Image (cartoon, rainbow, N blue to C red):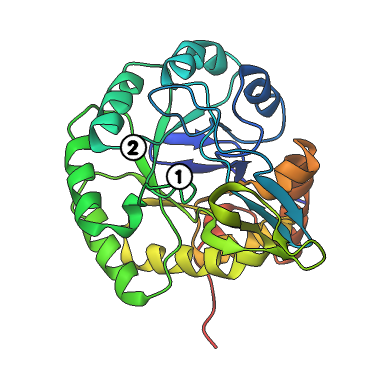
Amino acid sequence: MTAVDLSTRIANVELQSYIMNASGPKCTSFDELKAISQSASAAVVTKSCTIEAREGNPLPRYQNLALGSIQSMGLPNLGYQAYLAMMADLKAQGKPVVVSVSGFSIEDNVKMVSAFMESEADLIEVNFSCPNIPGKAQVAYDFEQTKQSLAALSELGDKPIGIKLAPYFDMSHFVAMADIINQFPVKFVTCINSIGNTLVIDPHTEQPIIKPKGGFGGLCGEYIKPVGLANVRAFRELLNDDVSVIGVGGINTGIDAFEYLLAGADAVQIATCFEKQGPECFARIESELKQFMGSKDYMTVAQAKGQLKPL
């Protein structure tokens, strides 16, 4: 029997598998990133970096839930210069490197993206959707700021730039964002980030279960898979064909990954499952995806991608 081929492409970067880590869990230090490079993850995605190093929000800021997690991490990271210094060594591990940047202003993002344009990074993912910084609005929900940001970032160099998007819930917002993205040389979108400003309460203590922002945090994991699938599907239908779509949200099994493939995702990223299970999850999900695709006679990603059948 012919083996299922999960190789895919984001912008001009070849990936040997459909599955990689998402920026967020276990990707802050060099040792964590090296562990990802030694796993079955198709690429190494860094923690979203800021200009200066950050400790993040006060503890407790992450709690597991039955079907996912809630977190308000606050972008703990080593600062962009530390990740710049790691790029050559990360690349030497043998896999594509996706650097995630999350500035607090257009100027921050321009400075960081300009620097990574001169690095060994393969792809630059600009995070427009961190919902857990007190006092900072998500760029992804401000369409005018998104347009200004993309205009500035588009002038900085030749490495492929993508943007990580917040979840959208209204079709007019999908259309408005897609119209903006289609005006610029954005090479990929990553959707979705966690669903921001959710609240989980412990009825026994009568308190929220995380501390920052009075308990408001980003909901992650299986809870958000239907939202992730909807966002991938909508953007795949609305964006230019040369814009890749990376799906994120609630992928715990190969069948979950296959659903994102049907919705039109060119690749998927794993966050909460990786947080809970460690890097072994990548090989397991890849194996399950190959097995399920083979059972349906799909031998390549291209054969199944976007093949969602209408009722």
Label 2 CA crowd tier, 10 Å (few <14, some 14–19, many 20+): some
- Residue at 54 percent of width and 73 percent of height: 308
Q: Is residue 103 left or right of residue 53?
A: left
In this rendering, does residue 3 appear at all? no
Q: What residue is pinned by disc 2?
A: 104
- Point out residue 219 in the picture as x, y percentages from the top left corner: 60, 59
Badges 2 and 1: C-beta atoms under 8 Å apart?
A: yes
Q: What residue is pinned by disc 1?
A: 133
- Point out residue 205 in the picture as x, y percentages from the top left corner: 79, 61
Q: Is residue 215 left or right of residue 142?
A: right
Badge 2 marks a residue whose secondary structure is: loop
- Residue at 77 percent of width and 45 percent of height: 276
Q: Nearer the viewer, residue 207 or 301?
A: 207
Among the 4 quarters of the image, the one containing residue 23? top right
Above-or-below relation of 217 to 229: above
In the image, farthest residue toward the bottom:
311
Above-or-below relation of 232 to 15: below
Disc sitting over residue 66 in the figure: none
Locate the C terminus by quadrant.
bottom right
Choose the circle earlier in sequence order: 2 or 1: 2
Above-or-below relation of 209 to 93: below
- Residue at 74 percent of width and 65 percent of height: 206
For badge 1, the amino acid type reads Ile
Badge 1 marks a residue whose secondary structure is: loop
Q: How many marks?
A: 2
Q: Nearer the viewer, residue 66 or 260?
A: 66
For badge 2, the amino acid type reads Phe
Label 1 CA crowd tier, 10 Å (few <14, some 14–19, many 20+): some
